[in-house]
Amino acid sequence: RLGLKTETLGRNIHHEESVDSTQKIAHRLAYEGSPEGTVVIAEEQLSGRGRMDRRWHSPKSTGVWMSVILRPNIPPPKAPQLTLITAVAVVQAIEELTGLTPQIKWPNDILMNGKKVTGILTELQADADRIISIIIGIGINVNQQLNDYPDELKHIATSLSIEKGEKLSRADLIKILLGKLENLYKLYLDKGFYPIKLLWESYAVSIGKSLTARTITGTIYGKALGITDDGVLMIEDSNGKVHHVYSADIELDS
Ligand code: BTN
C-alpha cells in the first residue's frame, strides 16, 4: 500500500487507528517473536510516551506515530547508537520530502527553527550481555497547525507543515523514512558506527555550543565537543574537564 522498496523494514506493518502507545504494542509483538523490521503505526495515540516519562502529544491523523522492531547483534551499551542512526534517517527523509534541512540536538531531538519537529525513543529488551530487541519509537509532527498545539507546546514544538507552509503526505514520509533507515542500518551493521557519526555530526546543532546538560547524577555546564565513536556526548566544563554524557536533557544556552 505504501509502495515500499525496502527489504526488511516495514515488510510487516501493523496499522492501527487508535492505541495507547505504539511502543507498548511493539514491545508485545517483539516479545512474542515478531521479526526484525516489524513496524507499528497508529493514527492516534492516547498516551504517547516521550523520554524521561514525559507525554508525547499524538493527535489523530496529523503525525507519524511509529515504532520499529530491530534485532541487531550488538552489546546492550551500544544501543544508544540506534537513536543516532534513526535521527540521521529522519533528517534525510525530511530533507527529501520537503527540501528543508532540520538539525539534530543530541541525542534525539530534531529541530526546525529551534523548535521540536521529531522525537525518538529507543527502548530495549535485553539480557545482561545480549540485545533481544530494540524498539525505536519515532514521533514526527507533520500536518499540525499552530492552533492544534496546547499552549504549553506552542513555543517549543513545530510541524513540517508549519515550516513548509503546505500539507504533506504522511505515507510518502513513512516510505522515504523506512528506506533511509534501512540503508543506514545496513551501513552500520556492515561498517560500524563511524560513518554514521560523520553524518550525524554534519546535522548536529549542539556541537561547539555552550549548553546545560541535566543528568541523573547532576548538572553539567560546558561546551559540547562532539560525540565519541560510540555516540557518547563529550562536554568540556569551564575547568577544562571533559565529561562523557550517556543520557541527559540538553538545554542550549542562547
Ligand atoms: C521524546 O522526544 O521524548 C521521544 C518521543 C517519542 C514519541 C514516539 S511516537 C511513536 C512512539 N510511541 C510512543 O508512545 N512514543 C514514540
Image: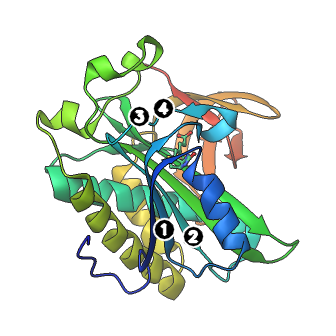
SS class of the residue under badge 3?
A: loop
Within 10 angstroms of label 2, few (less than 14), some, or many (20 or more) residues? Answer: many
Any part of residue 21 in sight: yes
Identity of the residue drawn at 68% across and 36% down? 52
* Residue behind mark 2: 69
> Marks 4 and 3, Cα distance to the nearest angstrom?
6 Å
- Rendered image: mark on residue 57: 4
Within 10 angstroms of label 4, few (less than 14), some, or many (20 or more) residues? Answer: many
Any part of residue 122 in sight: no
The amino acid type of the residue labelled 2 equals Ile
Q: Nearer the viewer, residue 18 or 4?
A: 18
Identity of the residue drawn at 79% across and 70% down? 126
- Could you say where residue 202 lies in the image, as x and y percent from the top left? 34, 55
> Marks 2 and 1, Cα distance to the nearest angstrom?
6 Å
Identity of the residue drawn at 48% across and 32% down? 57
Q: Nearer the viewer, residue 238 or 228?
A: 228
- Could you say where residue 111 lies in the image, as x and y percent from the top left? 36, 37
